[in-house]
Image (spheres, grey):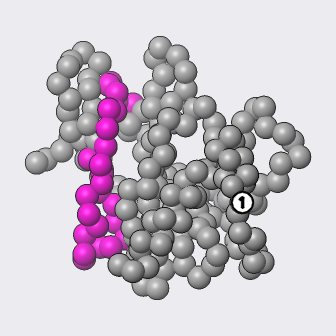
Amino acid sequence: MTRILPTLAAALAASLAFSGASPAQDATTTEAPAAAQQPGGETAAPAETGAPQPAATSDEFSAAVEKLSPLVQDVQVVGPWSEGDEHGVWRTVMVQPAGENAKTHFFIQQLDASGHDGLAIRSTTEIPEIAKMDGQVVGYRADDPNEAEPNSLSLFFEVVPSDGEISETYELHFMPGQPYVFGPASN
C-alpha cells in the first residue's frame, strides 16, 4: 500500500500529461517514440531509453494540459494494479467527437511505475462496445481490485438509454492479455 499512494499521485500528474497530437500542434514538438500495435487493440509501450528524466516544471504541466485534445472529455485514475514486482495504476480516457450523433469512445490504459523515473504507458485498449451503445455514459466507478487477481480491473457504468430516463448499469471486467467481459450488470 505504501508504494501505491505515491504511484497514484504520480498517475494524477501523468493524467494531466495524457495528450495526442492535435491538428494545430507545432510540428517541432517532440514526442516519445510511437508505440507498437498489438493484436486485440492493445498497444505496447515504447522501450525505455534508460536516460534520467529531468524533473517536470509547472510550465511543462501547463503545456501538457494545453496539448489535450478537445475530444478528450474525461481522464481518471481508477485504481492500482500489480503483477509480481511490477506495479502501477489504471487510467481511463473517454473521447467524444462533436456532433449530434457522436459516440463516446472509451479507453483503458495500464500505466507502469516499476523500475524507472515517472510513469510509462504499458498498454492502451479501446472498449468498442461503449461506442456502439444506444445511450450516454453518465458516470462510472471502479471496484477495489480482487486480491486473487491484483492485475485486474472492474468498472461499473451508468448509462442513460437514448429512449429512456432511467439509467442502466453495465459492468466491465478487464485483465491484460485476456478477453474482457462487458455487458449489463448482473447485481
Q: Position of residue 143 (x, y in %)?
A: 25, 58
Vertical side of 39 occupied by 113: above or below: below
Vertical side of 164 occupied by 89: above or below: below
Q: Is residue 20 visible?
A: no
Q: Position of residue 29 (x, y in %)?
A: 83, 48
- Pick out the residue farthest to the right: 28
* Residue in view at x 50 percent, y 35 percent: 73
* Residue in view at x 45 percent, y 65 percent: 8
Residue matched to label 1: 57
Q: Quadrant of the N terminus?
A: bottom left
Q: Nearer the viewer, residue 33 or 74?
A: 74
Q: Position of residue 84 (x, y in %)?
A: 42, 84
Q: Is residue 45 visible?
A: yes
Q: Position of residue 167 (x, y in %)?
A: 20, 29
- Pick out the residue farthest to the front: 58
Q: Amino acid at mark 1?
A: Thr
Q: Which residues are magenta?
A: 132-156
